[in-house]
Amino acid sequence: MVDGADISGWSDVAAGWAELWGSFAAPAQDELIARCAIGPGTRVLDVGCGSGEFLARLREAGAEPTGAEPAPAMAAAASAHAPVVQADAENLPFEKGRFDVVTAVNALQFADDTTAALREFARVLGPGGRIGVANWAEAARNDVDVLERAVARALDEEQAPDGPLRPAGGIEAAMADAGLEVVSAGMAPAPWRAADETSLVRGILLGEDDATMAELHDVVVTAAVPFRTADGGYELRNAFRWAVAITR
Ligand SMILES: C[S@@+](CC[C@H](N)C(=O)[O-])C[C@H]1O[C@@H](n2cnc3c(N)ncnc32)[C@H](O)[C@@H]1O
């Protein structure tokens, strides 16, 4: 599994992320498009854009998307869909008022300083700009947690507790701390599907080396039995929380 703070680790998994995880947050992305009133001509900056699937979706909605992404291989993949700058959430190389909306999907949790990142989002907007953040809901709502716990047990490791953005109200509290006015919030499904056992293990252990994948293969497959589908694949039901704020 990728250590979120390890930027070169994100670069290493760019192709695997695009293939296996690039689309699972689509319902939360659609919620942000609607709630941030994104449409033709909206200038949107997607921070931590990963391999760029949301940039493509924004473009389909008629928006003018730009990506910001610190991991070089992720940024390179995303640049197939829109202009992308290599930058992290707290240091965005844009002038004040450059965008109408800033989004961050499954990315704000990796900023060293959440408040500083959200203030930086506000800076590149003007007053009345919108910030949309979506993130994993608390572990108890996510089937993927069952597999991650099984892996942690097999490795005799402690599973990391939920970060502050994950529980109900977590994103809203972070936005309020940054001086933003929260205007809406909710939850969206984030189903993750794997076509077969191989994709399941590659997806859950993304970022691990071949030896670790082989060692943990049976652990993942056994823990995933409740999530098997009739066609031999797997479907994990998960949830994202999202919130939208406006700048003052
Ligand atoms: C879990 S991926 C999500 C990518 C994309 N937003 C998506 O939903 O598919 C997290 C992304 O955040 C990026 N990231 C890590 N630290 C970051 C930071 N401090 N600021 C902005 N992005 C960061 C990673 O490089 C990675 O591409």
Image (tube, rainbow, N blue to C red):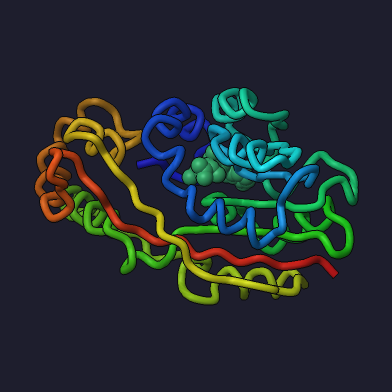
Count of numbered circles in the view: 0
* Residue 212 seen in the figure: no
Q: What residue is drawn where x is 50% and y is 65%? A: 241
Position of residue 48 measured from the top left corner of the image (x, y, whole percent)? 61, 43
Position of residue 16 measured from the top left corner of the image (x, y, whole percent)? 39, 29
Position of residue 208 measured from the top left corner of the image (x, y, whole percent)? 31, 33
Is 132 positioned to the left or the right of 143 in the image? right
Tell me if residue 240 comes above or below residue 225 in the rendering.
below
Quadrant of the image where one finds ligand 1 = top right
- Say which of 188 and 131 sits in front: 188
> The N terminus is located in which quarter?
top left
- Say which of 45 and 229 sits in front: 229
Q: Quadrant of residue 17?
A: top left
> The C terminus is located in which quarter?
bottom right
Is 91 positioned to the left or the right of 169 in the image? right
Q: Quadrant of residue 231?
A: top left
Is 69 positioned to the left or the right of 23 in the image? right
Tell me if residue 16 comes above or below residue 128 in the rendering.
above
Q: What residue is drawn where x is 63% and y is 28%? A: 81
* Residue 155 seen in the figure: yes
Tell me if residue 81 comes above or below residue 137 in the rendering.
above
- Say which of 227 and 150 sits in front: 227
Position of residue 38 measured from the top left corner of the image (x, y, whole percent)? 71, 52
- Say which of 193 and 11 sits in front: 193
Q: What residue is drawn where x is 54% and y is 36%? A: 53
